[in-house]
């Protein structure tokens, strides 16, 4: 097994790419979807079950973990992998995005951000240097630069100012990260939906040099059409020989459209969060299991799915445990949704490798257009 971090590109189909990110903790097959383990757990799932869905890597949230149980405590207990019983790669965000979304509870300066904890109101300070320290204490394999981004729409002056600050923070993040063989630091491109600002940001990041690059500042209210328009140019501005990560995305059709435009990695709470609210993703679209039409339905959620929820239970049972607010409901639907997402990524990897991505995309949209199976 490799002791260094590297990326190998195996094939392309149009702008879609498939490859492998090599890390000392194991390989990540790309395009990859990273389930979100916010508070050192993918909610309702045991780590070995997350692995069984096909996940090669998880995401942990710096903001949540620094407040509780704290990075220092996780470090004393042997690091995040040991703490949460996941020995494969972990990517941590920088905490920046979640702090920004606190709105009135935070104050932004050149130095960093001061904010109040949503848990107990205690005051905290987060800077590029502190974010690097927290992510090192957690033992993260892929560390993200500390950055800042406005919600969209925002005016151009605000987007430029924010992007330039993020680039200064990117340099400070790089300096603070230092030389850590086997661990990677990813830079984050900003610039809103503006092509020239995105190009400037990409140029600044290339000058600093990172192990991978994220397209940041999207999925913040701009809508899918605007996001795809931005992805028509943003990934191409980044180095071809490094992984490209689209942060916080998304719905299944977002993933397909973004892979088509050259993205390699994704994370999103959607499959796990939706599982807890009774929404299931299937190849024929979203199924609301709470709907009364499932009450007497003996058929599985998705007859073609091999996950435990679909292999062993009927729609009627899934409806019953959801309506009864049983914990098993969240467990089964989260498992199904994560399984669906990983199958989707595997299908895209196979399609890119065989040069059939266009056919795959057509089939994907055709199945969804059919809608759910007819009620019994
Ligand atoms: Zn299933």
Image (tube, rainbow, N blue to C red):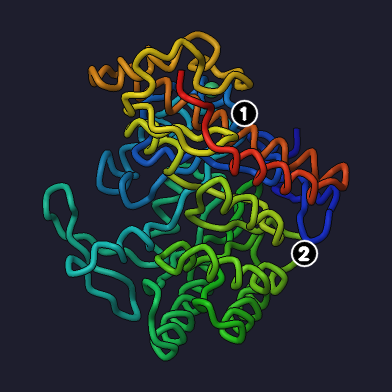
- Residue 149 spot, x, y in % from top left: 41, 72
Task: Establish if 327 lies above or below 355.
Answer: above
Task: Establish if 7 lies above or below 188.
Answer: above
Mark 1 Cβ and ligand 1 under 8 Å apart: no
Q: Tell me the residue that label 1 is attached to.
A: 54
- Residue 354 spot, x, y in % from top left: 87, 42
- Residue 313 spot, x, y in % from top left: 46, 10
Q: Nearer the viewer, residue 37 or 16?
A: 16
Classify 10 Å Cα crowding around label 1: few (below 14), some (14-19), many (20 and above): some
Image side of residue 67 versus residue 376, left or right: left
- Residue 244 spot, x, y in % from top left: 65, 59
Image side of residue 125 versus residue 334, left or right: left
Label tally: 2
Image side of residue 94 versus residue 187, left or right: left
Task: Establish if 135 lies above or below 301.
Answer: below
Q: Which image quadrant for residue 202?
A: bottom right
Classify 10 Å Cα crowding around label 2: few (below 14), some (14-19), many (20 and above): few
Label 2 with label 1: CB-CB less than 8 Å: no
Image side of residue 195 versus residue 44, left or right: right
Q: Nearer the viewer, residue 177 or 250?
A: 250
Mark 2 Cβ and ligand 1 under 8 Å apart: no
Asked which secondary structure carries label 1, the reply is: loop
Q: Which image quadrant for residue 243?
A: bottom right
Q: Nearer the viewer, residue 225 or 19?
A: 225
Instruction: Look at 55% across and 12% down and name the residue there.
Output: 311
Earlier residue among tags 2 and 1: 1
Instruction: Look at 55% across and 82% down and name the residue there.
Output: 194
Instruction: Look at 72% across and 48% down and name the residue there.
Output: 361
Asked which secondary structure carries label 2, the reply is: loop
Residue 240's mark?
2
């Amino acid at each position: 097994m490799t002791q260094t971090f590297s990326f190998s590109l195996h094939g392309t189909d149009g702008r879609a790419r498939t490859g492998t990110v090599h890390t000392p903790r194991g390989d990540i097959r790309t395009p990859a979807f990273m389930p979100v383990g916010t508070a050192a757990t993918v909610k309702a799932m045991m780590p070995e079950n997350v692995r069984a869905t096909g996940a090669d890597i998880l995401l942990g949230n710096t903001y949540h973990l620094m407040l509780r149980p704290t990075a220092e405590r996780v470090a004393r207990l042997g690091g995040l992998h040991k703490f949460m019983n996941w020995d494969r790669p972990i990517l941590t965000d920088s905490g920046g995005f979640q702090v920004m979304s606190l709105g009135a509870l935070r104050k932004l300066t050149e130095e960093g951000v001061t904010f109040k904890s949503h848990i107990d109101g205690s005051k905290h300070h987060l800077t590029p240097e502190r974010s690097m320290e927290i992510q090192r204490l957690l033992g993260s394999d892929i560390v993200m630069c500390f950055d800042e981004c406005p919600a969209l729409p925002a005016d151009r002056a605000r987007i430029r100012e924010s992007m330039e600050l993020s680039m200064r923070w990117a340099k400070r993040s790089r300096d603070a990260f230092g030389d850590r063989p086997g661990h990677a630091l990813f830079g984050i491109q900003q610039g809103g939906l503006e092509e020239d600002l995105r190009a400037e940001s990409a140029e600044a990041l290339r000058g600093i040099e990172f192990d991978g690059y994220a397209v940041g500042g999207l999925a913040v209210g701009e809508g899918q059409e605007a996001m795809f328009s931005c992805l028509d140019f943003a990934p191409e501005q980044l180095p071809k020989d490094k992984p490209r990560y689209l942060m916080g995305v998304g719905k299944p059709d977002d993933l397909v459209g973004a892979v088509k435009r050259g993205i390699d990695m994704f994370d999103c709470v959607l499959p796990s969060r939706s599982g807890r609210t009774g929404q299931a993703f299937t190849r024929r679209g979203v199924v609301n299991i709470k709907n009364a039409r499932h009450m007497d339905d003996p058929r599985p959620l998705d007859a073609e799915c091999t996950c435990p929820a679909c292999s062993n239970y009927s729609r009627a049972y899934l409806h019953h445990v959801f309506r009864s607010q049983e914990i098993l409901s969240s467990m089964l639907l989260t498992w199904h949704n994560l399984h669906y997402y990983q199958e989707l990524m595997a299908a895209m990897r196979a399609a890119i490798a065989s040069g059939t991505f266009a056919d795959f995309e057509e089939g994907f949209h055709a199945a969804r257009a059919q809608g759910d199976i007819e009620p019994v």
